[in-house]
Amino acid sequence: MQLRSIAILALLALVQAQAYRLTEDRSLIAEIGNATNQHITAKPCSSNATEFKSCYLTSTNAKDYPWGSPEITYSAAGDPWGVHLTGPYPDGRTYLVSWFTGGPTIKRNPTQPNTSALVTYASVQAIPSAAVPSGENLTFTGKIITYLRLYSDTALLNYSYLSPFIHHVVLANLTPSTTYKYQVSARNGNLAGNYSFTTLPLPADGAPSPYPLRIGIMGDVGQTRNSSVTRDHMLSNNPQVVIHVGDNSYADNYHASNPDLYKSGGTNQQRWDSFSVLWEPLFSKAPVLNIPGNHEVESVGIKSSISLTTTSWSFPTNFPFQSYAARFPVPGSTAATFGNITANMYHSTVLGGVATLISFNNYIAFHPGSPQYKWAIQEFQKVDRTKTPWLFVQYHTSSYHTYTNHYKSMECFMSIWEDIFYRYGVDLVFNGHVHAYERTHPVYKYRQDNCAPIYVTVGDGGNIEGLYRNFVDDISSTTKATYCEGFTASGQSPATLYYTNPGGWSSAGPRPANCSTVSFQPASGVAGGAPVMCLNNTNPLLGFCQSSQPNWSALRDPSFGHAILDLLSNTTARFRWFKNLVGTKVAVDDVVLERQASCQNRRHRSRHLSSSS
Ligand SMILES: *[C@@H]1O[C@H](CO)[C@@H](O)[C@H](O)[C@H]1NC(C)=O
Ligand SMILES: *[C@@H]1O[C@H](CO)[C@@H](O)[C@H](O)[C@H]1NC(C)=O
Ligand SMILES: *[C@@H]1O[C@H](CO)[C@@H](O)[C@H](O)[C@H]1NC(C)=O
Ligand SMILES: *[C@@H]1O[C@H](CO)[C@@H](O)[C@H](O)[C@H]1NC(C)=O
Ligand SMILES: *[C@@H]1O[C@H](CO)[C@@H](O)[C@H](O)[C@H]1NC(C)=O
Ligand SMILES: *[C@@H]1O[C@H](CO)[C@@H](O)[C@H](O)[C@H]1NC(C)=O
Ligand SMILES: *[C@@H]1O[C@H](CO)[C@@H](O)[C@H](O)[C@H]1NC(C)=O
Ligand SMILES: *[C@@H]1O[C@H](CO)[C@@H](O)[C@H](O)[C@H]1NC(C)=O
Ligand SMILES: *[C@@H]1O[C@H](CO)[C@@H](O)[C@H](O)[C@H]1NC(C)=O
Ligand SMILES: *[C@@H]1O[C@H](CO)[C@@H](O)[C@H](O)[C@H]1NC(C)=O
Ligand SMILES: *[C@@H]1O[C@H](CO)[C@@H](O)[C@H](O)[C@H]1NC(C)=O
Ligand SMILES: *[C@@H]1O[C@H](CO)[C@@H](O)[C@H](O)[C@H]1NC(C)=O
Ligand SMILES: [Fe+2]
């Protein structure tokens, strides 16, 4: 065991020495080597292409598995299905295992069963190792919940979906860095299944280094054949934990009456069930840190409403986020909070004892004064960078990307949060929503800044809505101008929206508060090409568009894939993006990152912000 620690230390020293050598002549960088100046846009593939590393397909065939396909089918007889892990909890030792038994009931006025007296079990057995020589064998009990959603569609008047039994069992205080076999209870109470997962490390005096620590990142995954390629590629990269930046099942694209009828007016809950079947191979093997996206809101076709300015909620049955909250409790959940929507909207936890992840829901209020704002400020203040050197943030909607769809829809959010991310020295921000891949250089207010976060958009998990192909700076064949210049939201140009609604720009995303800006983008432009002004040309105080890929954009490729982040030490990481068309042998984006002590905001415990809550 001692030899092993020495070997790990030697390896670590090597990695650090190498990183040091590469950077010795630089004072302040976050990317090492050639990646610092990377500025890449994938090209459309030719029809006879055989090599896909730097090109993207111009047409795609992202179709959900048809209802009844074996990949998404479960037995309603009582065996567990859709097993998924959530975690780690903030203590670094606790995980949640969730699963389903039985099937849903869809009829008029179904009676929600009283499950409060029912107990469910999970048993875990440690594979004996250095950490647990005796192989601990533990049984945990938990809770069963169901939820009921009343459909509002006229064809289904008074029909409801009553969920299968949803089982949640907290696996408390497991041993770090230990592989556990586990079983979960069937409807009849017997333990069933043959699952296993490995707990993340948790450094303590004498414990081996938590590095390297492998984190998978993906978003907008859905349930198509492309989704299962993403799933299998992620599995073969063997992440210790997976960050999912939201938009899970896309159930809300299905009509309530038919899980194969792809049209609005529904939010067909059965597609949540099939989603869990498709993703079980990954979700039962690696704990997942999920966050709600717009497809988790589900306020169409059911009796519900949501106001983004609401700051105190009471969520009755049929409130938004109900399905998501019932199925994916946040890390930290207890039996008291399973199924409570308010308690499962955002979360914070620590990965491997060294990386804090703060996860926002950008579809509920986030402005000063809101519960989420107060909570997040406290989470940032709690971070001690001398103990947990890495700091990551995730939320669904992408802040920095150059695709036409959802362009600049987070300017309001950023008018509140970008300065806070900067001052607390966030290393990486993970987003989805944009169905494509893009990584930025460290960027602050549209300027490259080596003390700012790198933003990663990975909404490319494979969902049925397909990929977004147009860059804002591409010339549209119909208008002969950039897509950005023709940009409208709800039929209005950014300029019109700005002057009619000075409270702030929002192309589609939430704008729960008056925002201080339309865009932080400087009027002088941020790329080599000439800036293109969408806003008021007589008084162009702000930039909005540019005629080429801006220089803060490092690599963009509208293809399906997933990302892997390897934390190698307290200061060094390797980030890679794997494209489904290419496979897992070669990463299409591959960059080494180094946190520099010369960035004040990344050095020590962050100074407290002057409280504006
Ligand atoms: C960096 O770029 C140079 C010039 O394009 C190339 O010769 C070299 O191989 C690259 N180095 C790495 C590590 O990719
Ligand atoms: C593909 O077709 C183009 C012209 O259609 C040709 O120039 C090119 O060489 C072909 N590439 C391959 C790999 O066959
Ligand atoms: C559900 O069952 C529990 C335990 O049997 C009981 O205490 C409770 O009153 C029941 N709730 C309802 C709503 O019937
Ligand atoms: C562990 O617990 C399970 C379930 O109670 C039991 O079947 C198994 O035999 C136990 N294994 C050991 C090694 O004690
Ligand atoms: C639907 O439910 C409402 C409220 O319970 C009731 O008034 C109405 O008659 C029902 N309609 C049908 C068609 O069942
Ligand atoms: C359980 O899974 C492991 C690994 O996949 C396999 O080796 C083993 O045979 C399985 N055991 C049973 C009882 O199915
Ligand atoms: C999506 O999957 C389909 C079916 O396997 C495949 O033909 C298509 O090329 C994939 N699309 C992309 C963009 O990878
Ligand atoms: C649900 O959670 C919220 C937030 O934690 C809490 O204020 C509320 O009392 C909980 N509701 C119930 C019914 O437990
Ligand atoms: C990383 O930081 C932790 C906490 O400060 C410290 O105990 C550990 O020695 C550091 N590791 C390295 C390789 O610097
Ligand atoms: C936004 O500003 C307008 C005009 O000052 C004010 O009427 C409105 O209440 C504000 N809205 C919010 C959410 O603060
Ligand atoms: C990026 O472009 C802007 C505007 O052209 C320029 O001022 C800035 O120096 C560029 N940054 C880098 C790192 O090249
Ligand atoms: C441009 O901005 C000026 C001052 O901000 C304003 O007076 C003028 O009406 C605006 N023009 C248009 C076309 O919006
Ligand atoms: Fe989305």
Image (spheres, grey):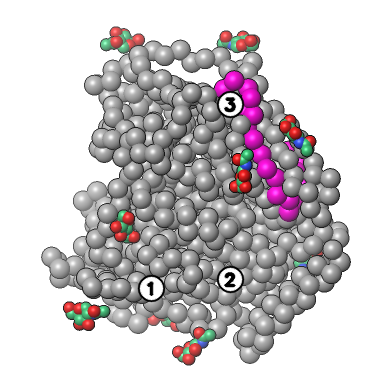
Give me the residue at 35% from left, 82% from top.
528
For residue 523, above or below residue 343: below
User: Which secondary structure, mark 2?
Assistant: strand
Residue 230, percent from left and from top: 44, 55
Q: Main secondary structure of the magenta part?
A: loop
For residue 294, above or below residue 494: above
Report whether 177 appears left or right of 285.
Answer: right
Closer to the N terminus: mark 3 or mark 1?
Answer: 1
Total numbered circles:
3
Look at the image and say whether residue 173 sits in the magenta stretch: yes
Instruction: Report the disc number at residue 53.
Output: 1
Q: Residues within 10 Å of mark 3 (few under 14, many from 20)?
A: many
Query: Which mark is nearer the camera, 2 or 1?
Result: 1
How far apart marks 2 and 1 lie (CA) works out to 19 Å
Query: Which mark is nearer the camera, 3 or 2?
Result: 3
Q: Which residue is mark 2?
A: 574
User: Which secondary structure, mark 1?
Assistant: loop
Residue 350, percent from left and from top: 67, 52
Closer to the N terminus: mark 2 or mark 1?
Answer: 1
Pointer 2 with pointer 1, Cβ within 8 A: no
How far apart marks 3 and 1 lie (CA) works out to 45 Å
For residue 51, above or below residue 338: below
Q: Residues within 10 Å of mark 1 (few under 14, many from 20)?
A: some
Q: Could you tell me the amino acid type at mark 1?
A: Lys
Which span is picked out in magenta? 172-191
Report the front residue among 313 and 594: 594
Q: Which residue is mark 3?
A: 186
Give me the residue at 79% from left, 41% from top.
136
Report whether 4 appears left or right of 190.
Answer: right
Q: Residues within 10 Å of mark 2 (few under 14, many from 20)?
A: some
Give me the residue at 76% from left, 60% from top.
387
